[in-house]
Image (tube, rainbow, N blue to C red):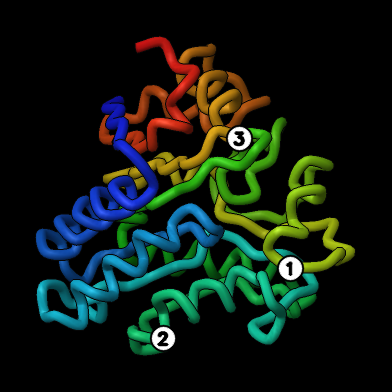
Amino acid sequence: MVVKILKDYNELSKKAAEKAAGYIKAFPDTLVCFAAGNTPLGMFRELVKMHEQGEIDLASMWYVGLDEWMGLGIDDEGSCVKVMYDAIYRHIPKERVCMFDGLNEDADKQCREMEILIASHGGIGFALLGVGMNGHIGFNEPGTPDIEGCFTVALDDVTKSVSKKYFGKERPVTTGITIGWRTLYKAHNVVLMSSGKEKAPIIKAALDGPRTPDITASLFQNHNNITIMLDEDSASLLQR
């Protein structure tokens, strides 16, 4: 586990983008999983800039979405699919992107199709992950079952509470669909990003504390190719 502490959010975003760009150049035509959410948005802006300047070719990769709020679709503000298409996927041919559809009630079928797609690419090559306030990765909430594949999950109260920052209003979200942490753990290269003082307590618990299913992020401590990228605020409680 490599931990890199950057000065602020801008530097964090640039360094994470450089890491992702390095992978894109080195391993074209492999599968990438980018987390939605606020933390990666600066990194996405940097990647789009590199793409437009011809430094990388985003269209050389294949992409899978990490998760989605059940009941929300691309026209819903704050849905993962809308966030990702607005931020980065509009620059990529649609046939190279597969995301969960929160409006499709046949979640089991979606999960099996996503598993087949991931397997057809030999697994996920590069995973860019964020950390929730409760330590979740995607919608692998505290106490998530230790199984491979994709599944739906009842959202933790903390996740439901903070969801309003994405939607701008209260939404009755209770269930998520996600790639499971075991499948993400098999990714060849993992980058875990975190920013902000509000994340400092959970980052300390995830990195300084024991591996526990109660804090999903902690389960990645012994991944053999993971880079933890934090800004100073997020790292402020870590043992140095």
Q: Is residue 180 left or right of residue 95?
A: right
Crowd band around label 1 with a 10 angstrom C-alpha radius: few (<14), some (14–19), many (20+): few
What residue sits right under mark 2 in the picture? 90
Q: State which tag comes first along the sequence, 3 or 2.
A: 2
Crowd band around label 2 with a 10 angstrom C-alpha radius: few (<14), some (14–19), many (20+): few
Q: Secondary structure at mark 2?
A: helix
Residue 3 visible from this viewpoint:
yes
Query: In the rendered image of this protein, does residue 142 appear above or below residue 59?
Result: above
Q: State which tag comes first along the sequence, 1 or 3.
A: 1
Mark carried by residue 39: none
Foreground of the two, 227 or 105: 227
**Count of labels shown?**
3
Foreground of the two, 52 or 211: 52
Disc 2 residue type? Arg
Disc 3 residue type? Glu
Pair 1/3: label in front:
3
Mark carried by residue 167: 1
Disc 1 residue type? Phe
Q: State which tag comes first along the sequence, 1 or 2.
A: 2
Pair 3/2: label in front:
3
Q: Secondary structure at mark 3?
A: helix
Residue 134: % across, % down = 67, 34
Foreground of the two, 6 or 89: 6
Mark carried by residue 198: 3
What residue is shown at x 15% (from left), y 72% (from top)?
A: 56
Q: Are marks 1 and 2 in contact (CB under 8 Å)?
A: no
What residue is shown at x 18% (from left), y 56% (from top)?
A: 23
Residue 154 visible from this viewpoint:
no
Query: In the rendered image of this protein, does residue 143 appear above or below residue 204?
Result: below
Q: Are marks 1 and 3 in contact (CB under 8 Å)?
A: no
